[in-house]
Image (cartoon, rainbow, N blue to C red):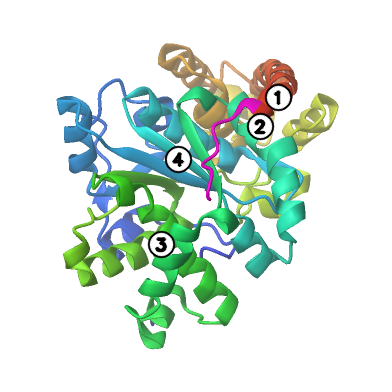
Amino acid sequence: MQKIIDPWGSELVEDYVKIVKDFGLEKFNTKLFPNPSRLMRRHTVFAGRDLDIIAKCIKDKKPFYVLTGIMPSADKIHFGNKMVIEQVKYFQEHGAKTYVLVADLEAAATRGITLEEAQKRAMEFHIPAWIALGLDPKKTTFYFQSENKDVMHLAYKYAKKITLNEFRAIYGVADPSRIFAALTQAGDILYPQLKERMPGIVPVGIDQDPHLRLTRDIVRRTKAEKFFLPAGIYHKFTPSLSGKMKMSKSHPQSCVELPEDFSSVKKKIMRAVTGGRETLELHRKLGAEVEKCMVFELLKTHLVEDDKELEKIYKAYKSGKMSSGEIKQIACEKMELFLTTFTKDLKKAQKDVKKLKFIKFG
């Protein structure tokens, strides 16, 4: 059976080890990068492509870029977006030239959003939200896909470098809107190299790997252009608090959205699947099944920065000294602080959005 990862789907990956093997990825090594981030240290980042090239750029202080895109089709974001932003922030802090594109064309082609609405949502919410989550706007170059003629020219050129069967082999489907969106993304990924040929890295969930594979195939077929193969770094998905194997954004009733009232999030946490035993007596005796606990997963991936603090919670919960109710209380307290800070920083960023550095296309 042909193996497909679907960038437009919602199924979660269950076996990351198998994915690394099947798609020729590099298993992530936490020793590769200096001062690894929380996501790196805790193996939420699990794989990549050509990571050694980016690590060498950081070590030798050579030019490289990090690029990501905003899909402005919704009026909220989720914790999966937060992980992308945190990875962009990490590379930004380690010297990467940072590019953030607003995928208004892709939103129009695949989500039915008008360009005007996509741009409005990006300026009023999405970009300020990314800034509130740690993106440094002073070190970031922004642009709208629809205004970038260079990207369009690259997409047109690359349309001649791949066949319909090859596209189906990568994506599983080949309808016109998705072909258009994918080729445009290839143009986006390589756009920073038009000005200066340099390595670049794209942080994504594993569902977006097809776009990296397509772009890397195109680079191999356009050797005269002397583009660097784009590197990729992949993080695991944030599961639904219900424990279901769907992307969390597909289950708003059991995932944390941003923005969201704390009272609403608290209800979700209190209903979340935990690793607690059937009775408190049994829990004290056997300890929690931490690997099944979505609340601990939330703490580990998003809410507890300090490793020693997380280890203390883990040991107390695993031994049965800490109950499921107590770990939910910890998560609620930390989530309330996070949401309060996010809301305050979002409002500030919304006031400053007009000062952003957008590329002007004549």
In the rendered structure, find residue 52 and report the number of the disc placed on it.
none
Q: Amino acid at mark 4?
A: Tyr
Q: Which residue is mark 1?
A: 346
Residues 209 and 56: in front is: 56
Task: Note whether 293 is above or below 22 in the view shown.
Answer: above
Q: Amino acid at mark 2?
A: Ala
Mark 4 or mark 2: which is in front? 4
Q: Which residue is mark 4?
A: 99
> Is 30 one of the magenta-colored residues?
no
Q: Which residues are magenta?
A: 355-362
For label 4, the SS is strand
The answer to which image quadrant residue 343 occupies is top right
Q: Which residue is mark 2?
A: 129
Mark 1 to mark 4: distance in Å?
20 Å
Is label 1 in contact with label 2 (beta carbons under 8 Å)?
Answer: yes
Mark 2 to mark 3: distance in Å?
25 Å
Number of numbered callouts drawn: 4
Residues 20 and 107: in front is: 107
